Image: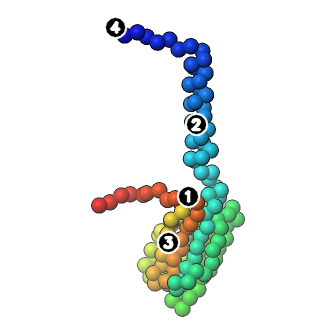
Amino acid sequence: MRKSIALKKGDVIVIAVILLAALLWLAVLRWPERGGAQKLQTEIYLEGRLLQTVALTEEVQELRLESAAGYNVLQIGAEGVRVLEADCHNQDCVHAGWQNRAGGLIACLPHRLLILLSGEEEADFDAISR
């Protein structure tokens, strides 16, 4: 035969305090703030050299990068970074869209341009393949 255990008022309070502390720990330590508080920055490499490092801010910036191979126009803001326009033939860099997580990468191989997002937050996996 099973005996039922009755919870006392003190037991309920202790359980509630533990649950509240766990929720606060998750909210403060585990969920990063959004909207630029991730301290992400864009590292722009052209022809193998670090050209510029730009922090993601609310203010939208457009940078035009020119080299002997052609030009790229970057847009950098709170949403992340993207290549807005390029004169390369395949347009892979333009089709990459917005990158807004640490580890995000845009490459324009014909222009030897590499755009990398770095910061405190690690990138989530989009997919895992074998």
Of marks 1 and 3, which one's residue comes earlier in the chain?
3
Q: In 3D space, how far apart are the residues under numbered discs 3 and 4 (Cα atoms)?
A: 66 Å
Hey, which quadrant is residue 9 in on the image?
top right
Residue 32 point in image, percent of width and height: 59, 51
User: Identity of the amino acid at label 3?
Assistant: Ile
In this rendering, would 1 be left or right of 39? Answer: left
Q: In 3D space, how far apart are the residues under numbered discs 2 and 4 (Cα atoms)?
A: 37 Å
- The residue to which callout 1 is attached is 121
Q: In 3D space, how far apart are the residues under numbered discs 2 and 1 (Cα atoms)?
A: 21 Å
- The residue to which callout 2 is attached is 23
Q: Where, quadrant-wise, is the C terminus in this rendering? A: bottom left
In this rendering, would 56 be left or right of 100? Answer: right
Which residue appears at 53% of the width and 71% of the height?
A: 116
Q: Where, quadrant-wise, is the N terminus in this rendering? A: top left
Viewer-closest of 48 and 67: 48
- SS state under label 3: strand
Judge whether 29 appears above or below 82 on screen: above
- The residue to which callout 4 is attached is 1
User: Identity of the amino acid at label 4?
Assistant: Met
